Image: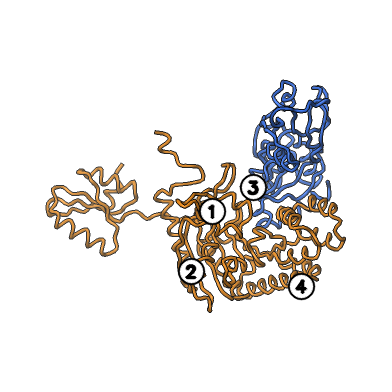
Amino acid sequence: MSEITFALPKGRLSEKAIDILERCDIDCSSLKSETRQLVLKDKKEMYKFIFVKPSDVPTYIERGAADIGVAGKDTLLEQNRDIYELVDLKFGKCRMCVAGFDKNKKNLYGNLKVATKYERVAREYYELKGINVDIIRLNGSVELGPIVGLSDVIVDIVESGNTLKANGLTVLEDICSLTARLIANKVSLKTKSELILPLVKKISEVV
Amino acid sequence: MVRKLKIPYGFQDYLPNECYAKRQLENMLSEIYVGYGYKEVETPTVEYYDVFHDVCDNDKLKKMFKLTDNDGSLLVLRPDITLQICRLASKLDLTYPQRLYYVENCFEYLDNNDTARTREFAQIGVELIGDSGLDGEIEIVTLAIKSFLRAGLTDFKIELGNNNFFKGIVSECGLSEREISYLTSLIERKDSLALESFLQSTNASSDFYDKLLLLPTLFGGSEVFEKAEKISENKLTYSAYENLKKLYNALKEIGYEKYICIDFGMLHGYDYYSGFVFKGYSKNFGLCILDGGRYDGLCPSFGFQGKAVGFAIGVQRLLSVLNEKELMHTAPYCDYAYYCENADIAKEISFVEQLRKNGKKVIKLFCNDTETLLGFCKRNNISQAFVIRGDNITKFEKESILCQK
């Protein structure tokens, strides 16, 4: 029986997450095969891996459906879950930024309009600065906001800045820098500590 | 019609089997507490907001169901029973410690349903109010362990902490209250990275820096005491260390060592608890089931002296664990089923009441054919059936029930 359930994010973070697991001598051959299966195991059947949407990883962890997992700091900031955040995995580096047009026209009428996927992050950022904003929640292609006049600025993660550039936008303010993190369920870390702690230690040594 | 069948999110019905299992569990646990001399109390569902205002943090205050009274005063649906009991204890003689327990529902006003929490939740808990010291803490943890054992759990952990350990360390650092509150949230998340960068930004001394960075790692078995002692120079910190060590050793003597673990970085409810804190978990269930500790500050917040220690068990969560482990108590249905055909009612009553007097459960079907009766018995696992015709009682053998389709 698999003892530990490991939640991995599909998409941009998955390859590097698997890379780290391999460096910890965990057999990841099943994870690299072309498969549509959502639940995979290592050869020793010590780990059960589940692939989930990146923003769902903290949900699986908080409720204990997975013991340990990899999530972007952006997701963690936005969701503010009751979990342990154990190791900075140092990949998936990017920044949370405010972006808009170069000559950002000062909005003379009403509140600043902010389009974002990160509602909580944006709200807390502007609250701290004492600026009233209208948050417009979008699920993707946030850059369109200022272009079509839906919003004055956007709050989003910026990796290379190429998407912004291609659309004539620039970074106006830096909010914070982000990386992928190893997170754990609060109960699992205690009830399965003999399995999880050595793994956490190993991972923090190889990153 | 759909709207009429809906209930608000975060609330639930207990259908007969669930309700039976819940009541069984509550009764089993109550029995333990009664055996230790605890007496049950009930508190009102609605309280003044002011009762909670001074002792609960902002987040908790926000998450209260609020109502207004006709004089405009703000009321809340009971968010926490411990505070109510501390209020209630002002009416009791505390010369000797009072032992109290409760089985009640609490309410939390969640504003989004994407959470493992519910808006109404059943709690069963105990409070030991008055001066009881370490012995009181030993008794409370013992009751917690006995509760889990009685419910049928075997692979559970009771985790002990003491927030004075942290309080002592930060008392020497000159950080603001706001900074300390941020610090607790980082340590609660065991987020060493953010902790490190925060400490760098505050120009804390390297000594202080090292102690705090060690805190998220100070958890596990008895081996953590050695590491903890090394950073226990502060008086308050040392007293917390000593408290946990004594408690641990006492529980070990009782034979509970396998259930116990330690976390010096356990800082939940930092404003509420004063010193000793503990939690209860079951393996393979990702949420905390039991929560408790010492709250010596609560009675004084009502203007009288009284130390207190206790815990509460989340009944729904414990039931979920029992359900997953197939340890739930299922309701035994009836022993007998019957129907009448032109029956002599006096004869019927005297016969079935005699059965009930002997402790049998007897159910009457409102039908008039044998097939329905026997079919019902088979579906519900009832082994005995009879028909009353006039003043004549015909019993059916088990075989005739079993051979029903």
Mark 1 vs mark 4, CA separation in Å: 38 Å
Dot in front, 3 or 4: 4
- Please state if B294 lies on the left or on the right of B399 as rendered: right
Q: Which mark is residue B235?
A: 4
Kindly check if marks 3 and 4 are in contact, taking CB atoms under 8 A apart as contact. Answer: no
Q: Which chain is blue?
A: A
Q: Which mark is drawn over residue B171?
A: none
Q: Nearer the viewer, residue B75 or A2?
A: B75
- Chain letter for mark 4, please: B
- Give me the C-alpha separation between circle 1 and circle 2: 19 Å
Residue in view at x 84 percent, y 54 percent = B202
Q: Do we see residue B125 in this rendering? A: yes
Total numbered labels: 4
The picture's colour for chain B is orange
Left or right: B132 in relation to B219: left
Query: Callout 4: helix, strand or loop?
Result: helix
Q: CA distance from mark 1 to mark 3?
A: 14 Å
Type of amino acid under label 1: Arg
For the residues tagged 1 and 4, is the chain the same?
yes
Q: Which residue is mark 2?
A: B32
Query: What is the x, y in percent for residue A101?
Result: 80, 25
